[in-house]
Image (cartoon, rainbow, N blue to C red):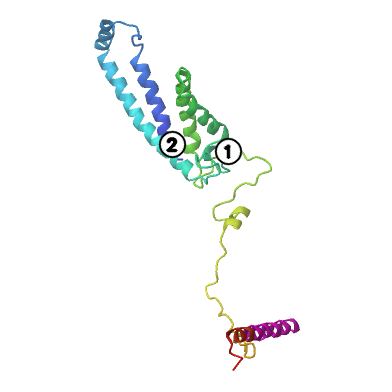
Amino acid sequence: MRIAPLTGLVAVVLTLVGFLLLGDTPGYDAIGSAVRAFFEDHQARTGASLYLLELASVFFVFFAAHLARAVRDVPASGGRLRLATVRAAVSPLPRRPARAAVVLGVLVFIPWVSYFALPASYLWVAVASVPLSLRRQDGTPTGTAHRPGRRRPGPPGGEPSARQRTLQRPQEPAHRPPAPHRQPQPLLVQAGEGVPAPHGVAEVAQAVAYGRRVRQADQDERALCGLDHP
């Protein structure tokens, strides 16, 4: 059992106690003298409430850092947004709370809706702290249900999956055998152009035809230049 995820539960408790200790404050339409009189009469209680809320924000930071680290350790499978808590095979949270986190993260930025989404977010943090604290060392939550038809991921030291074997680069041998020595092929001196000696009938015919074309081109060039006439 880990202690770091429980900082979220501590933050929720401190926030709840802080708001309850603050009590019923004057409304937004109250006059200035009424607001001043309220805080003068409840000065000690207001100070203690604000202190608890500030302390709760510190614990919220620790919980958010632990949750970000838990998500980062999961292999990404949903794109650059790293919604590994929703789509990964090995998730730090059960699937339903993970999906609820995405919905609440959007609702808290909507006016009027955030009035109800913010308390629901506090409840989500308190609920999510429990499976995160009970998570195994390999990153698998204890409450994650295994769906039929999908292969359960094995231990880190077990046999790699088919995708891992596909992406794994083949290991080169430590001592590579020396390459066989190739003998240089003899050249056709008759062709005059350094053509490798042929090994088949078709290659012999091509070499002879090539040599004839070379000699014919040489003769045509000499005749054009007038080298064959006295």
Check disc 2: other Cα within 10 Å, few if <14, some if 14-19, many if 20+.
Answer: many
Where 190 falls versus 213 (above or below)? below
Image check: 206 left or right of 8? right
User: How many numbered discs sit on the rendered protein?
Assistant: 2
The image position of residue 48, as x and y in percent, is 29, 21
Residue 88 in view: yes
The residue depicted at 63 percent of the width and 40 percent of the height is: 146
The residue depicted at 47 percent of the width and 42 percent of the height is: 70
Residue 159 in view: no
- Which image quadrant is residue 191 in? bottom right
Quadrant placement of the C terminus: bottom right
Where 20 falls versus 148 (above or below)? above
- Which image quadrant is residue 196 in? bottom right
SS state under label 1: loop
Residue extending farthest right: 201
Report the span colored magenta. Answer: 195-218
Find disc 2 in the rendering and name its residue.
5
Mark 2: amino acid: Pro
Find disc 1 in the rendering and name its residue.
144
SS state under label 2: loop
The image position of residue 173, as x and y in percent, is 55, 71
Mark 1: amino acid: Thr
Check disc 1: other Cα within 10 Å, few if <14, some if 14-19, many if 20+.
Answer: some
Q: CA distance from mark 1 to mark 2?
A: 17 Å
Magenta run includes residue 203: yes
Q: Between residue 9 and residue 214, name the one nearer to us.
A: 214
The image position of residue 23, as x and y in percent, is 35, 13
By secondary structure, the bulk of the magenta-drawn segment is best described as helix
The residue depicted at 69 percent of the width and 43 percent of the height is: 149
Where 230 falls versus 126 (above or below)? below
Residue extending farthest bottom: 230
N-terminal of the pair, mark 1 or mark 2, is 2
